[in-house]
Image: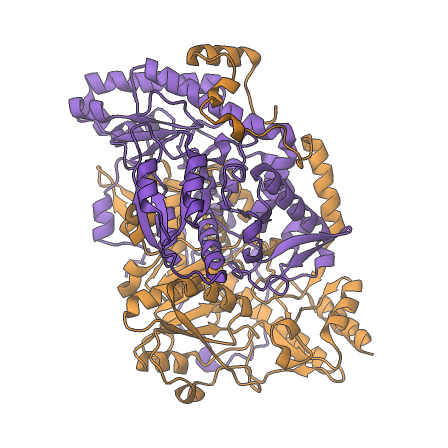
Amino acid sequence: MLIFEHSRPGRRNYSQSPATPAGKSKIPQNLLRKSPVLLPEVSEMDTVRHYTRLSQKNFSIDTEFYPLGSCTMKYNPRACNSLAMLPQYLSRHPLAPEDTGQGFLACMYELQETLKAVTGMAGVSLTPMAGAQGELIGVMMIRAYHESRGDFARTEIIVPDAAHGTNPATAVMCGFKVVEIATDKEGNVDLDALKAAVGPQTAGLMLTNPSTLGVFEKNVAEMSRVVHQVGGLLYYDGANLNAVLGKVKPGDMGFDVIHINLHKTFSTPHGGGGPGSAPVGVAERLLPFMPVPIVAKEGDTYRWVTEKEKPQSIGRLSAHMGNAGVLLRAYIYIRLLGMHGMHRISEFATLNANYLMAELSKAGFEIAYPTRRASHEFIVTMKDIKDKTGVTAMNLAKRLLDKGYHAPTTYFPMLVPECLLIEPAETESKETLDAFVKSMKEILQEIELQPDMVKGAPHTMPVRKLDDVKAARELDLAWKPSA
Amino acid sequence: MPFIPHTQEDIAEMLASIGAKTIEELFDEIPKDLISGELTGVPPGLSEMEITRLMMERAGQDGLYQNFIGAGAYEHHIPAAVWQITTRGEFYSSYTPYQAEASQGTLQLLYEYQTMMASLTGMDVSNASMYDGATALAEAALMAVRSHKTSRRILIPQTVHPIYRQVVRAIVSNQKIEVVELPFCTDCGQILPESLANSVHEEFAALVIPQPNFFGVLEQVDALTDWAHSKNAFAIGVVNPTALALLTPPGEWGSKGADIAVGEGQPLGIPLSSGGPYFGFMACKNELVRQMPGRIIGRTTDLDNKEGFVLTLQAREQHIRRSKATSNICTNQGLMVTAATIYMSLVGPEGLRRIAAQSHANTLELVEQLEKINGVKRAFSGPIFHEAALTLPAPVAKVLSQLKQKGILGGLDLQAYYPELGNTLLACVTETKTAADLQNYAETLKQALS
């Protein structure tokens, strides 16, 4: 039932708005609204019940194991939320004077400095509001760098075929042409293809390392040399930073620009699809182009650095300073972890992934890159199973929902057929992983004995398989009251 | 080990299963020279008790003020239930609803949100949100250019939020789109529709129309919308969602209505929190839905013909279309929209109208009191909603600093954004201020100026 269907004309929550209608108005008649606003008229209790019940129709980290590859679904510590929601932080206006926000700015400055230290970059800006915006800002800086040198011939961005869809989409949004390069059978970027693709037209290469295939790009140093040699820059998509945090710094791998998904590696909540936050880091030569604002420290005082001091900055990409509340949560998280907590994250994320890969392999699942170590994630391919039984990766994913597990990422990366990208994250215990393996084995048996039942999954969710085609053909994007 | 549950026994068993001796061995594919040693520049870890103390100390250092700054971010009462429900783990810690059957809560909520926003803006459809108001406007500009086909020029009046103009410029310039700024009438603080015919001669894809504008002044939206349409261009409304409870929605502007409506969603239950996370909203006419960026939720049915909700029109998006997507946008601001939807349900249509009307009345009251002070007068004659530009007889920065000593953040100094306006202050009052607060502000300002 929709909230609108609980609505009754004239029902109001008297505590939630001014008690008496305001008298004074000087809005000209011709600008006044004549049509009603379709908001529900429901009691506070009914609202609370409705949305509490809706929440219960969601899977979440707090309720289920969520091995969603490339998304790093780890526990979101509650302290990060409650401390970021102290009233002084919540009520601070973004344009309030700097001297009324020294406590907040101190947190932002220390976050910037810590991110610099763990990534090996020369500067960090906290403004990007999501991974895709971090990418946009990063690629804009690459463009600004080349243009500042009078080099307007660099029209191409190179992207491996295993990359996230945001990489090519971002390059196009920045006005670049995308050149896709292939992956070899070991899961590495094909070096010969890269060498053939680069030239004076190359603005840069966007790379995720470890890649979305769940393996470390062994030739990263050579790739860096190849791209830099022709004058291109290297962009690091930090989607999988969790796998190497505190172990390998993107700066040491030769990257010139990076973004860090705080909602992955630094455990800020995914919130059902945002808000994210993706600070960008740059090497020395890109410092002048960073987006503003940035926090500076002078003596014991913190202040914003604006475009006045950074005339070559690519400018502002958000109305204020990005997702401040998300940044606070990440700051609290890194203070809880401390210096030793950083490398423990990648160590235990890697341990969990390799253990799960070993156990699933023993259980009879085919691993896409069996000769490689898993990074913090790995790929199972269902191709053989599909050829034999007709059961697809998507069917298995849906059957997992019935068993109380969120599905792994399916059909991404696109180059592995019938793939499941599995990332357990470091916060899961061995018992949880073992129970997951047990359920996966059960599904293997079900595929053998009752393939149609598996194909019809899920069976225990609030709804069964939904009709996507109908949704797109008969667009119903807003409820309308029946006449 | 913070947030890592493994016992020594677990580690040993897991390594045995893998066939490795140490965890270190699992990193043996990484070239040795890339492995960094001990991290420097990262402080040691704190316990929850210690970080609580630190964060409370820093919060105390920042303090609490009577806030009269608006300029795109507005203080409103937020019902307690909004964030208590929003931060339930099932909303807070869930992922983007790709697995529809396991995400019906978020998906239904987003469908309800789309319904509310489409109605509030008077448009046919709304997406599931953008990053913030400024980026929503930039995406609307890109959308207009994609749909217009012949022009790559966008007209933005200087009465649009100055930072929004900067953000639009930064984003659209990547695609060789020209942004032309239009001057405003310095007496009334509005764009004069009759002046446009003389100042604009070339073809353009869209005209951006703010309502209310950055100065809090109400624009002549009907004439502006009709003018844009007469030039075969789109009309993009940038609106305050609270104000829409009182004002004609963009979908009803002029004879045909604006084509795209965007704005900052923060006033709908999102705390100010130093500028984010907020959310941008975007709604449009049916004809443009396939050019709209971002997530869109549709209602459909399952195998048993039962109602359900899914992400739809995904063929526009980056994870399917890659380099041919309408935008690189991947997420919406899901959790913020959760809060906004609960907020709009709790206040309802009459509550939102009263909040808007009270904010308007309080602003008129403050302006009336301040105009009694010698040398203080409204900078513009145009009608206002809940914000006013005031000319002071002294440098604004100095006055604001004195108000701050008394615990009042008196507004925004427009010097940095509109130096030509001289000593002009932009002050905002919402329903959160009482008569005593307004009187206190007026008296304090009077003292500061004496």
Q: Is residue B345 above or below residue A417?
A: below
x 73%, y 67%: residue = B436
The purple one among the chains is A
Left or right, A132 with respect to A95, comes to left
For this orientation, the residue located farthest to the front is A229
> Could you tell me which residue is drawn at 48 percent across and 17 percent down?
A430
Q: Does residue A453 appear in this view?
A: no
In the figure, residue B394 lies in which quadrant?
bottom right
User: Chain B shown in which color?
Assistant: orange
Q: In the image, is B266 to the left or to the right of A85?
A: left
* Figure quadrant of the N terminus of chain A: top left
For image coordinates 46% across by 42% down, the residue present is: A236
Would you place residue A363 above or below residue A104 in this image?
above
Percent of width and height locating residue B13? 48, 10
Is residue A352 shown to the viewer in this render? yes
Above or below residue B233? Residue B315 is above
Q: Nearer the viewer, residue B234 or A62?
A: B234
